[in-house]
């Protein structure tokens, strides 16, 4: 800057410039929204994989036969409906713990997929 041009910036401060047409602070909102969507999709995929694993085990119990699968399903539903409330609660708790264990397993195994997406997004932002 030459001496003839007046300085609108105080001594020692740096200008804060945003890209034309952007709202200051919107980048933080975009980062939070992107992270939320990424984690939600990653967790949904893990839950679907855990549900598929449970269904796969049930199909293996039926010897991978469609007729036997529906026969086993009918047998399980008959036993479930005939059981008292305590037994139903124990069965539901068992399924919940089994599903939660599978989700935890997939979260541990697939954590690199979530971390690589986050690192890629941060790297793209820092290169600007």
Image: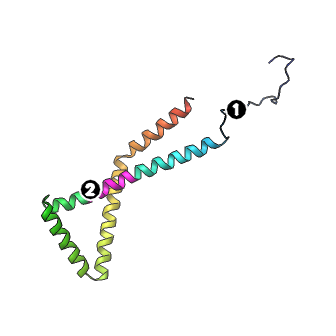
- Look at the picture and state if 102 lies above or below 90: above
Task: Name the quarter where the C terminus is drawn.
Answer: top right
Q: Residue 77 at x, y = what percent?
A: 23, 74
Earlier sequence position, callout 2 versus callout 1: 1
- Look at the picture and state if 4 lies above or below 45: above
- Residue position for label 2: 53
- Residue 52 appears left or right of 124: left
- Residue position for label 1: 17
- Please name the residue shown 30% across and 69% down the image: 94
- Asked whether 80 or 89 is in front, the reply is 80
Question: Which is in the foreground here, disc 2 or disc 1?
Answer: 1
- Residue 18 appears left or right of 35: right
Magenta span: predominant SS is helix
Q: Residue 107 at x, y = what percent?
A: 37, 51
Residue 117 colored in magenta in the image: no
Q: Tell me the element at label 2.
A: helix
Q: Residue 110 at x, y = what percent?
A: 36, 46
Q: Tell me the element at label 1.
A: loop
Which residues fall within the magenta stretch?
44-54
């Amino acid at each position: 800057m030459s001496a003839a041009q007046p300085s609108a910036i105080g001594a020692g401060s740096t200008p804060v410039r945003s890209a034309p047409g952007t709202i200051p602070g919107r980048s933080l909102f975009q980062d939070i929204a992107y992270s939320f969507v990424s984690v939600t999709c990653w967790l949904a995929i893990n839950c679907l994989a855990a549900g598929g694993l449970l269904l796969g085990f049930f199909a293996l119990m039926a010897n991978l036969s469609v007729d036997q699968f529906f026969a086993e399903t009918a047998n399980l539903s008959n036993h479930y409906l005939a059981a008292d409330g305590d037994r139903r609660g124990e069965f539901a708790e068992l399924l919940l713990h089994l599903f939660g264990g599978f989700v935890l397993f997939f979260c541990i195994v697939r954590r690199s997929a979530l971390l690589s997406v986050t690192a890629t997004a941060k790297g793209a932002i820092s290169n600007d």
